[in-house]
Amino acid sequence: MNVRDALNSALDEEMSADPKVFLMGEEVGEYQGAYKVSKGLLEKYGPERVLDTPITEAGFTGIGVGAAYYGLKPVVEFMTFNFSMQAIDHIINSAAKSNYMSAGQISVPIVFRGPNGAAAGVGAQHSQCYAAWYGSCPGLKVLSPYSSEDARGLLKAAIRDPDPVIFLENELLYGESFPVSAEALDSSFCLPIGKAKIEREGRDVTITAFSKMVGLALKAADILAKDGISAEIINLRSIRPLDTPTINASVRKTNRLVTVEEGFPQHGVGAEICMAVVEESFGYLDAPVERIAGADVPMPYAANLERMAVPQIEDIVRAAKRACYRSTAMAATA
């Protein structure tokens, strides 16, 4: 099952199970979604539950939040999360803070979903990763699936959750297929929010990643294994809440940590993970923490520069080898 079909089936089943769930966004209905995630849903549920909106993120996000105040369960699709910038006031000030400001009297059961991060050749204004942005805000839950099972189980969890959830997909993963267990195909299947998954066990170095970067980390682990380095790969799944117990337990076993993300390095998800490990497991570290992130520049449009601006498999391999003292640091060049 590919990730697109996993998301589509999760939406379909949750809309079938709960008449309060509805989908809204640009081109989600007649066009069946910019990435065909909502294929067939308009025909099945009608225009009252699959709403094509004007190109006005601030407008339809506000409508969605208002609907959630009154007990409905909107799923708001952004054609790309870069466009959520138009609606960030509603997401942060209207959705994320209302439960706290009302002393628990107002729940806001809403999901904001869409592709996040770099795609290919779409320039700086369509390539940004918002995991760290939304992950820093109390009142939000932030999820970022990698596999089809992640996508299916986490989207169901997000829709069922009583709080606002940011659901960060990846355009380049939509068409990627993954094996799916029989359990995951059951309509009652749901993954816990706030729980990471160990994709591959290892003993020499811990590598944390989320979304598309999990695939790169797994490929890097295959290369490292040929050099006798056993890497443990943690698929974060949940950015907020972050599963620090799983991360710390792994680091206490491997004594080394490499964090991988495609977002900007400063104030990033990797920085938060580094601090969580320093606070809880500093005495277990046998090497400095290595942080792999996107370049600290707006995303270039040129393909050769774009490749240099996002993490590659070889970057992860080099960082893991540095952490295991298998390579010498490159001398700085003028």
Image: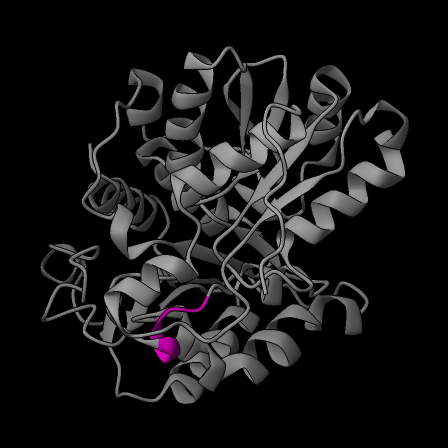
**Quadrant housing the N terminus:** top left
Q: Can see residue 236?
A: no
For image coordinates 41% across by 13% down, the residue present is: 226
Magenta range is 124-128
Measuring from the top left, give residue 84's x and y in whole percent: 45, 76
**Magenta stretch contains residue 330:** no
Residue 133's quadrant in the figure? bottom right
Identify which residue, 39 or 50, lies in the foreground.
39
66 displayed left or right of 329:
left
Q: Nearer the viewer, residue 70 or 250?
A: 250
Image coords of residue 233 (percent x, y): 52, 26
**Dominant secondary-structure state across the stretch colored magenta:** helix
Q: Nearer the viewer, residue 279 or 63?
A: 279
Q: Give the vertical position of 162 relative to 83 (above or below).
A: above
**Residue 81 coordinates in the image, percent (x, y):** 41, 69
Give the position of the C terminus as an image quadrant: bottom right
Q: Residue at x 60, y 49 (%)?
A: 239
With 152 as the anchor, is 70 left or right in this view?
right
**Horizontal placement of 129 versus 308: left or right?**
right
**Relative to 173, residue 78 above or below:** below
The residue shown at (81%, 67%) is 103
x, y percentage for residue 172? 26, 52
Residue at x-position 71% and y-position 44%: 273
Viewer-proximal residue among 199 and 224: 224
Q: Is residue 105 left or right of residue 196?
A: right
Among the 4 quarters of the image, the one containing residue 95: bottom right
Q: Residue furthest front?
A: 334
Q: Is residue 278 visible?
A: yes
